[in-house]
């Protein structure tokens, strides 16, 4: 530090001290500088790091105080313009949500301020409120309209931010404003604004852009609204001819809008012409913008790409990678069966150059998507170019995917390898082609593995090991031993993760039965039975024991049966004898894992770290062998000890095909006719493709004969890129290709659902069977009674419970319950039982029950208050997202009610908003009038009430006022929460508040299903699952506070265990449960 | 929507940064270095828009100073590009020469022009009005 600086610095505190006593007229300034002086003094007096931190903290606090809500509120009330202005700026940047009600009236006031800047800033503050708490400014929408019509342009422009946001959320609510926006845009475009709004002599360009965006949202899929704006859009396109960057920005937005709204051919043509201006511009920024516009536009009309094909080709080789990428994005959108190879090749080239992870993930996903969409179409273009053979070449698909896997590796989306394996396993339509594809994959992987020093991502190795394990049998020259040798090499490699090693070992296991000599396998077993990795050791032992029984192994791991489901007796009933014997000799009965865990937990009182739902799913087995589609659902097996003891009704196996008998596995082949039915119209198409190709090349040749070689190459590239777009015949072709690809997709989707859901289908099958039988047994006697209740539409049933019981009632009609139900209905996806049941039953109930059903449950009509002239009654409708209160005012004398008005006082825990429109078909005559209010919960409470008054006028009397109040309970805000067992497990662990309670149950309630049924009906809890003598339920307190309930029956005690994120909820619910159970 | 507004010099030092979406303080430095690095690596022939992660950067260079704006993909790049210039024109009108000693005022100007990631004012006279009143107050 130089001397002078040091001297100045040391003199500074003194200078500030002198300044302090000044005061007087420059009071504000003095206080400011004295504060600064204080700070400088503080800094110079610093002695340690600790003191410094303290000082900084102090300074921060005082800064916070200056911009804090109370200070700002004070400033807002100031008469000083600048203070108000600054306060508003602060409010519209940082403001706590809770303080909004406090300042909202102040800000609303400011909307009427005489100065435009204040009005404008007030609107911006409201925009901020709308961003952070849209509900709190709902009631002042009318004021937004006022701002939109403000005489000042700035205020109007500010209100557009709010409108853009609101229209984005719900465009249908603001269609009536279209005219206003059009008029405003017309005025702006027509240059009616003050000159100081111009930017480089373009009138308010950013305002124009904002308006165009709003119009685009409003006119989307709406012809009538769109018609209103055609004129002004036309004018915008015409006016924006000044050659300045900002006019291009407007043009871009204009084109975007024209293509977003309901199309008008004339405008589309003009807009398309405009794009030409961008794309052909020598300015790089405009070119980029043009490509972006084109990318958007060709999704509407792919032929537009044809006009600019040469430019697109040039951009593909552009030195700027950003331009290149935008071009690839464009090509990605016009990909069809004919040009997919070329486009994918271009994408791969780009991929190999990029290093940034985000780009790689994105691009790899797109390539994989294209390759999987057109797996067998890609090659057809290659075939055409070489014109040698007609046999589709599988190499393309596999090689493309190889590139994807080796570059994308471990960062790519996990769906990519899964989909690839699924495609490979399920095949397409021609079995020989499928086999060739698989063979090619196997061969290419072996070649890759033989390369020295090559490194492959783990995901790629996993894919390889699955394919090698499944399809090595297709190899002619090489024996399974050769493949095992390579896998062994990988297994010994230290850089390979243990997850991948599990895949590798699974492949070895699959290949073992095919191998002729077992030396290598035995060595492998030896090496890995002493492995330190428990998982590997387990696999090695499995292989060891299987290896001793080759016949069993062959039936367990059949060749090329990965798509077929292996049916397993999940209940392990063949072990019942063994279990019974064990029990008779005094062995302790088996307890399921979760039960053991719970007991342990109750003993030790420690935190539960294990996921709750773990023992219910069958992931233990399927996780390892999932690609093979083997499902060993073990849901019911948890109870096998008890079943062995009791031999009661809990094991119903009519629905399950018996594949595991006393002798072991009883294989039975099933032909999948349905899947092989579809055959694609491939050959015909190739011919047309050829034609088109010729047409295009001919035309090109006739046009330009004297072209350089380079240009010819480009032309060639263009013709291969843009096949399938444009000219009539090609449009036809495009349509055709599309349907084919759709077929593919649809088919594979179905299969996907099937293969993915096999496990759950399995388990739910058995579960449904069990559960429904349980229901049958316990509910049969009660059925009649219950049904009676239904037809009366008893008040406390929610739609869920309403719909579930009819299914039970229907069951006796179906001779074979679960399996036939699923088979006949062709249902592909099985959800946990209750929800499937609900969806199936919904239709039944709708048809057969309740003539005047409404969508939601509602309470009975109850009198609220009345006098000699009118009576007011009300009822509650329990909607999914809120409580809807309906008050109906009826005049007793049948006379006309004049200007009846109902007002509700704001209540502390609720948010009450008036609702228009009728939810119930209640007669509204002249003598009655209905009011609807939706009530949302803001804070949980135990008992609350809302009150209000009705004022009305009869014929020629004075207006009369009638007050009333209504009680609400928290139960009005409880709704079923539909989640899966797994989600339940996850949620359970994440909640801290829990309450346990034991309730003594009477005889009739002893069975768990009936107890749960009651909770479901009375308290609107959702039954997720019933496992043995335990049940899982869930509900939520509106808006979205979940609460979970776990209950277990032990002799005559029902143990309830609640958990929730809200501390008050479990207490409340346990009390209500007790009331329900004891009351019945 | 505008995600952030940066003024960075050629040496990579941040002169002004304003975030309209929360970014943790320690991540800001990293982001700023990466952003300026990708801007500096581009030549004049390349376009002024960069795709960076899941958003876009739009930059303009004025002598040694870079102004970089990060936006999400709903934004019109050219509109932002011209907005940067508008901002510079406002600065040019208000400051006669050096602006880096008056960063507070630059902040005031920016707050007038951009709020919550939206362009809220582009009229030069109106942007400067509050600042000029403030100046008058401190003079008297």
Image (tube, coloured by chain):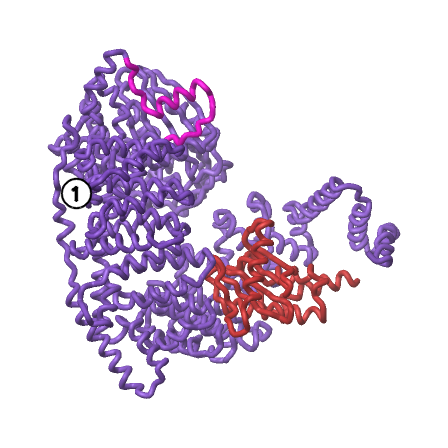
Residue span colored magenta = A587-613
Q: Assign the N terminus of chain A to one quadrant of the image.
A: bottom right
Give the answer, above or below, for where A828 lies relative to A82. above
Residue A277: image location, x then y, percent = 43, 78
Q: Which colour denotes chain B?
A: red
In depth, the one of A1018 and A355 nearer the eye is A355
Q: Is residue A870 magenta?
A: no
Residue A455: image location, x then y, percent = 40, 52
In depth, the one of A444 and A972 nearer the eye is A444
* A61 lies left or right of A323: right
Q: Quadrant of residue A56?
A: top right
Which residue carries the number 1 mark? A825
The answer to whether residue A864 shows anywhere in this view is: no
In depth, the one of A296 and A669 nearer the eye is A669
Give the answer, above or below, for where A747 lies relative to A789. below
The residue most toward the bottom is A706
Q: Secondary structure at mark 1?
A: helix
- Residue depicted at x 42% and y 66%: A325
Q: Quadrant of residue A762?
A: top left
In depth, the one of A758 and A296 nearer the eye is A758
Q: Quadrant of residue A803?
A: top left
As drawn, the chain in purple is: A
Pointer 1 local density, CA inside 10 Å: few below 14, some 14–19, many at least 20: few
- Residue depicted at x 39% and y 20%: A599
């Amino acid at each position: 530090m130089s001397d002078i600086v040091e001297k100045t610095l040391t003199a500074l505190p003194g200078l500030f001290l002198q300044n302090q006593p000044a005061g007087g007229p420059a009071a504000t300034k003095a206080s400011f500088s004295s504060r600064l002086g204080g700070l400088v003094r503080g800094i110079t007096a610093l002695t340690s790091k600790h003191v410094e931190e303290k000082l900084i903290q102090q300074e921060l606090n005082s800064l916070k105080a200056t911009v804090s809500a109370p200070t700002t509120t004070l400033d807002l009330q100031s008469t000083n313009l600048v203070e108000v202005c600054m306060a508003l700026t602060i409010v519209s940047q940082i403001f706590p949500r809770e303080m909004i009600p406090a300042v909202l009236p102040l800000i609303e006031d400011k909307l009427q301020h005489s100065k435009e800047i204040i009005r404008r800033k007030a609107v911006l503050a409201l925009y901020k409120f709308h961003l952070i708490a849209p509900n709190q400014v709902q009631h002042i929408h009318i004021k937004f309209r006022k701002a939109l019509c403000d005489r000042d342009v700035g205020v109007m422009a500010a209100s557009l931010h709010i409108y853009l946001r609101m229209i984005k959320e719900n465009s249908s609510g603001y269609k009536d404003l279209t005219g206003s926006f059009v008029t405003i845009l017309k005025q702006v475009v027509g240059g009616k604004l003050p000159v100081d709004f111009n930017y480089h002599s373009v009138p308010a360009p950013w305002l124009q852009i904002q308006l165009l965006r709003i119009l685009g949202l409003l006119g989307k899929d709406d012809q009538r609204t769109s018609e209103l704006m055609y004129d002004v859009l036309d004018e915008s396109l015409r006016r924006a001819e000044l050659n300045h960057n900002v006019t291009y920005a407007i043009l871009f937005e204009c084109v975007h809008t024209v293509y977003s709204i309901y199309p008008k051919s004339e405008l589309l043509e003009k807009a398309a012409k405009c794009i030409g201006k961008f794309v052909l511009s020598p300015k790089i920024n405009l070119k980029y913008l043009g490509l972006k516009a084109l990318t958007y536009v060709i999704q509407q009309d792919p032929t537009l790409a044809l006009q600019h094909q040469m430019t697109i080709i040039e951009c593909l080789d552009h030195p700027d990678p950003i331009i290149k990428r935008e071009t690839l994005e464009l090509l990605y959108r016009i990909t069809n069966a004919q040009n997919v190879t070329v486009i994918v090749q271009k994408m791969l080239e780009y991929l190999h150059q990029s290093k940034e992870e985000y780009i790689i993930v994105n691009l790899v996903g797109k390539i994989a998507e294209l390759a999987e969409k057109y797996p067998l179409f890609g090659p057809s273009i290659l075939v055409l170019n070489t014109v040698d053979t007609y046999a589709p070449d599988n190499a393309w698909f596999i090689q493309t995917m190889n590139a994807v896997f080796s570059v994308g590796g471990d960062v790519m989306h996990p769906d990519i390898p899964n989909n690839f394996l699924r495609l490979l396993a399920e095949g397409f339509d021609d079995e020989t082609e499928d086999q060739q594809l698989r063979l090619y994959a196997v061969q290419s992987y072996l070649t890759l593995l033989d390369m020295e020093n090559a490194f492959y991502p783990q995901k790629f190795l996993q894919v390889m090991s699955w394919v090698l394990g499944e399809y090595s049998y297709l190899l002619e020259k090489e024996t399974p031993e050769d493949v095992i040798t390579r896998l062994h090499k990988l297994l010994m490699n230290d850089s390979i993760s243990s997850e991948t090693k599990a895949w590798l070992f699974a492949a070895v296991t699959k290949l073992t039965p095919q191998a002729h000599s077992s030396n290598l396998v035995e060595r492998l077993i030896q090496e890995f039975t002493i492995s330190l990795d428990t998982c590997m050791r387990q696999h090695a032992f499995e292989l060891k024991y299987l290896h001793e029984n080759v016949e069993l192994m062959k039936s367990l791991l059949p060749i090329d049966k990965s798509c077929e489901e292996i049916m397993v007796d999940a209940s392990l009933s063949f072990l019942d004898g063994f279990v019974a014997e064990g029990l008779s000799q005094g062995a302790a009965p088996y307890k399921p894992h979760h039960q053991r865990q719970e007991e342990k937990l109750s003993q030790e009182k420690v935190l539960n770290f294990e996921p709750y739902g773990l023992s219910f799913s069958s992931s233990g087995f399927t996780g390892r062998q999932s690609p093979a589609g083997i499902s060993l659902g073990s849901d019911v097996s948890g109870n096998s000890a008890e079943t062995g003891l009791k031999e009661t009704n809990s094991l119903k196996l009519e629905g399950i095909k018996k594949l595991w008998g006393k002798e072991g596995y009883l294989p039975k082949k099933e032909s999948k006719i349905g899947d092989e039915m579809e055959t694609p119209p491939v050959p015909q198409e190739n011919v047309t493709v050829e034609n088109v190709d010729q047409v295009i090349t001919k035309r090109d040749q006739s046009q330009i004969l004297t072209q350089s070689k380079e240009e010819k190459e480009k032309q060639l590239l263009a013709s291969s890129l843009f096949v399938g777009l444009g000219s009539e015949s090609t449009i036809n072709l495009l349509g055709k290709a599309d349907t084919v690809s759709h077929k593919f997709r649809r088919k594979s989707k179905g299969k996907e659902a099937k293969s993915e859901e096999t496990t759950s289908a399995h388990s739910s099958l058995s579960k449904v069977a069990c559960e429904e039988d349980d229901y049958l047994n316990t509910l049969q006697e009660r059925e009649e009674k219950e049904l009676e209740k239904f037809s009366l539409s008893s008040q406390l049933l929610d739609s869920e419970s309403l719909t579930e019981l009819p299914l039970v009632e229907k069951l006796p009609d179906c001779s074979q319950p679960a399996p036939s139900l699923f088979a006949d209905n062709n249902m592909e996806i099985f959800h946990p039982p209750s929800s499937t049941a609900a969806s199936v039953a919904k239709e039944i109930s709708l048809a057969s029950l309740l003539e005047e059903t409404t969508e939601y449950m509602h309470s009975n009509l109850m009198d609220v208050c009345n006098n000699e002239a009118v009576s007011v009654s009300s009822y509650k409708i329990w909607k999914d997202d809120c409580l809807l209160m309906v008050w109906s005012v009826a005049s007793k004398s049948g006379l006309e009610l004049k200007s009846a008005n109902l007002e509700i006082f704001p209540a502390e825990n609720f948010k009450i908003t008036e609702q228009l429109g009728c939810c119930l078909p209640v007669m509204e005559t002249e003598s009655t009038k209905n009011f609807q209010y939706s009530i949302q919960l803001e804070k949980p409470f135990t008992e609350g009430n809302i009150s209000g008054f009705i004022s009305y006028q009869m014929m020629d009397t004075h207006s009369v006022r009638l007050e009333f109040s209504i009680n609400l309970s928290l139960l009005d805000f409880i709704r079923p929460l539909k989640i899966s067992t797994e989600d339940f497990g996850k949620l359970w662990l994440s909640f801290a508040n829990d309450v346990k309670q034991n309730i003594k149950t009477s005889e009739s309630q002893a069975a768990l299903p009936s107890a749960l049924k009651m909770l479901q009906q009375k308290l609107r809890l959702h039954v997720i699952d019933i496992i043995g003598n335990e049940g899982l339920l869930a509900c939520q307190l509106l808006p979205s506070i979940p609460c979970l309930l776990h209950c277990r029956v032990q002799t005559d005690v029902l143990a309830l265990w609640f958990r929730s994120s809200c501390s008050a909820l479990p207490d409340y619910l346990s009390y209500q449960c007790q009331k329900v159970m004891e009351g019945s | 929507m505008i995600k952030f507004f940066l003024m960075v010099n050629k040496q990579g030092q941040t002169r002004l940064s304003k975030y309209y979406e929360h970014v943790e303080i320690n991540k800001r430095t990293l982001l700023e270095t990466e952003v300026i690095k990708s801007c500096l690596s581009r030549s004049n022939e390349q376009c002024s828009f960069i795709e960076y992660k899941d958003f876009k950067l739009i930059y303009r260079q004025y002598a040694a100073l870079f102004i970089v704006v990060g936006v999400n993909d709903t934004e019109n790049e050219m509109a932002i590009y011209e907005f940067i210039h508008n901002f510079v024109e406002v600065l040019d009108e208000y400051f006669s020469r050096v602006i880096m000693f008056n960063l507070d005022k630059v902040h005031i100007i920016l707050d007038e022009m951009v709020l919550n990631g939206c362009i809220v004012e582009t009229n030069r006279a109106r942007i400067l009005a509050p600042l000029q009143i403030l100046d008058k107050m401190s003079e008297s």
